[in-house]
Image (cartoon, rainbow, N blue to C red):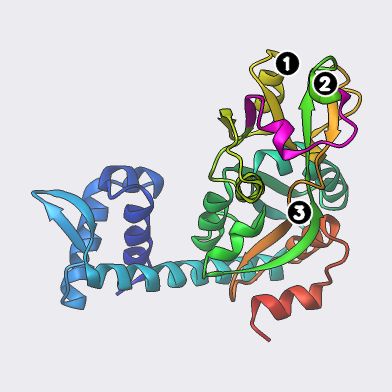
Amino acid sequence: MNLLQIKYLCAIVDNGYSVSEAAVASYTAQPVVSKHIKALEGELGVQIFERRGKRLTGLTRAGEEAYAIAKRLNADAQSLKALASDMTNAKAGVLTIATTHTQARYVLPRVIMQFGAKYPDVKLKLKQGNPKQCADWVASSEADIAVATEALAQEPLLVTLPCYRWNRCVIAPPKHPLAKEKVLSIESLSKYPLITYDNSFTGRSQIDRAFASAGVAPNVALTALDSDVIKTYVRLNVGVGILAEMAYEPKLDADLKRIDASHLFAASVTRVGLRKGAFLRRFAYDFIVLFAPSLKRREIEEAVFGK
C-alpha cells in the first residue's frame, strides 16, 4: 500500500466515481489510476468500488470504511507537507479558504487586506460554496479553513469555533408598504413574495422556523445562493428580500429600504472550521485571529488536537 493509492481512491470518490476525471484532477493518466486501484483492492483482499461493466458506480460497504480511512490518511499526508513548508519558509505558501458568497463579499475583504500586508508572499485562494461544500473541502484537505455558519459542525472530521453572531434584515423598495411599518411582523411578511437564501444555507432554516412558529406559510418566490442576487431581484420588484444584515451596504444599497428583522429570526453564528488533527501553517493561525480576534492560537490548537 502507498500514498498514491490512497490519493487516487479519494480522487475517484471526490470526482463522482469517474476514473478519467480523477486522473485529470491528479495530473496523471487514467490507466495509472486504474492500475493503482486494482493493486490496492488486490492487496486489501476486498472490493472497494461497485462496478457496472467497466464503470465505477459507488462504494461497497468495505469501500465506505476504506474511503473514510483514506480521507484521514490523505489529509495527514497534506499536514506533513505543510509542516515541512512551515519549517523551511514560514512566510510563504498557499492558504485556501472555503467560504460562502456573503462572507467572501462582505466580511473577508478587510481581513484579506490585513493578511496580505503581513504576508505578501502567501497566495490566498477562495473556494466559494454552501456551508456543506465548505466543510467537505476542509475535511478532504482541498481547503485549509472553512468560514461559514453552524452547518460546519455537522461534519465529523471538523472542529469549529464561533466567531461572531449575526441576524437578518428585510429589504424592499422605499415605497413598499412594509417600509411604512414601525415594527415588522411575520404576518406582514407572509403577505408578499419573498426572495431569500437557498435551503442549503443554515440561515434559511431560521427563517422557515420563524414562519412555522407563527403558524403562517412563507410565500417564497425565489431562492438564491448569494446576497447580490437577492438584491438584484428585489430591485426588479420580484419580491421583498430577507438578507444577512452584513450584506446590506448603506451607500451602495441606498435605493433599497432596510427594515430590521432581528426580532423575528433567531441569530446565526459564523464559525471557522478546521480538520481535526491537521497541522496548520503559522500564517493560517494568524488569518483566523485576524478574522476573529476573540480567538487565540492556543485555543485553536487545543480544539484541533482535542486537548
Say which amino acid is labelled 1: Arg
Residue 114 position, x and y percent, is 88, 48
Q: Assign a secondary structure to mark 2.
A: loop
Q: In terms of secondary structure, where does tag 1 sit? A: helix
Which residue is rendered at x = 33% and y = 55% of the image?
13
Q: Which mark is residue 235?
A: 1
Task: Read off the residue under disc 2.
Answer: 256
Where is residue 305 shown, x and y percent of the image? 64, 80
Q: Which residue does the numbered mark 3 point to in the structure image?
A: 267
Number of numbered callouts drawn: 3
Residue 154 or residue 307, whichever sits in front: 154
Inspect the magenta stretch and tell me whether residue 77 lies in it: no
Q: Is residue 164 visible?
A: yes
Whether label 1 touches label 2, CB < 8 Å:
yes
Q: What residue span does the magenta drawing correspond to?
A: 180-195
In the picture shown, does residue 256 fall above or below 122? above
Query: Residue flagged by tag 2: what amino acid is it?
Result: Leu
Residue drawn at the location 65% of the way across and 48% of the way down? 203
- The reply to whether residue 144 is in sight is no
Point out the residue furthest to the bottom here.
Answer: 307
